[in-house]
Image: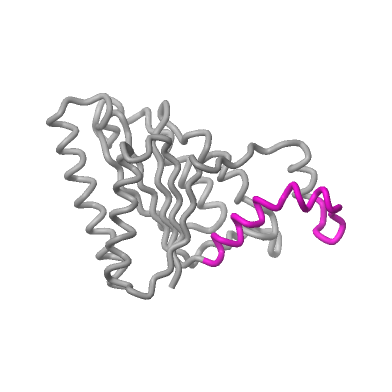
Amino acid sequence: MKLMHVDSSPKGEWSNSRALSRELVELLRAGLPELEVDYLDLAASPPGHVTGDFAIATYTPEADRTPAMKETLALSDGYCARLLAADMLVFAMPMYNGSIPSIFKAFIDQIVRAEITYKAIDGQYVGQLGDKKVAFITSRGVDLRPGTPWAHMDALTPSLRSAFGFIGVTDPQFVDAQPMQFADVEARAEGLIRAHQDVAALAAKWLAV
């Protein structure tokens, strides 16, 4: 069994999303000794943003691509191959200004690929990641849970559901550490306790299947 673990926070060891995603992976490893982990740190190796050359190469039939087009798509091809090879996907990120950090959005734009992560079949777009277990580990500066004053600011969760739903992810799991940066010590501690509990529950859920 194989797991792909993707971190994106630039904060290194100060990052809550990194710590929580690492905790989840360690719990899964403990329950699945044969688990192979493919790790990607987007902060250390940022993906490029979509360019005109990338867009042209993407929609050029594979047999007609020039060597330059293939080189343009090489990073994206590699990402897609790693995603498709994994049984579990764990993505960790902070929330920036209510939404996805640009570094992770660039990653999404690299992996939403026609005829690779989604295919046109009988007039329908069919995502190819439907057989994966997928988790998003996020950290949020304020409390965005339903019913809180800031709940309307959460553009991250629907954006992730939409993008990954298009490539086949039907049951994404979320562990959200909140409130963090813009909270007092007590609220932050309570938020981390909830997040650790959610990590443990998610690990148990995945290991039970």
Q: Residue at x 66, y 56 (%)?
A: 77
Quarter where residue 178 is shown:
top left
Q: Residue at x 56, y 55 (%)?
A: 167
Q: Can you give x and y, in whole percent of width and height, for residue 188 in the image?
A: 19, 33
As drawn, the residue found furthest toward the left would be: 186
Q: Nearer the viewer, residue 7 or 44?
A: 44
Q: Can you give x and y, in whole percent of width and height, for residue 100 in the image?
A: 46, 36
Q: Is the C terminus in the top left, top right, bottom left or bottom right quadrant?
A: bottom left
Q: Main secondary structure of the magenta part?
A: helix
Image side of residue 6 versus residue 74, left or right: left
Q: Can you give x and y, in whole percent of width and height, for residue 107 in the image?
A: 56, 44
Image side of residue 67 versus residue 89, left or right: right
Q: Is residue 22 above or below residue 207?
A: above
- Magenta segment includes 76: yes
What's drawn in magenta, residue-wise?
60-85
Q: In this view, does 75 lie above or below 202?
A: above
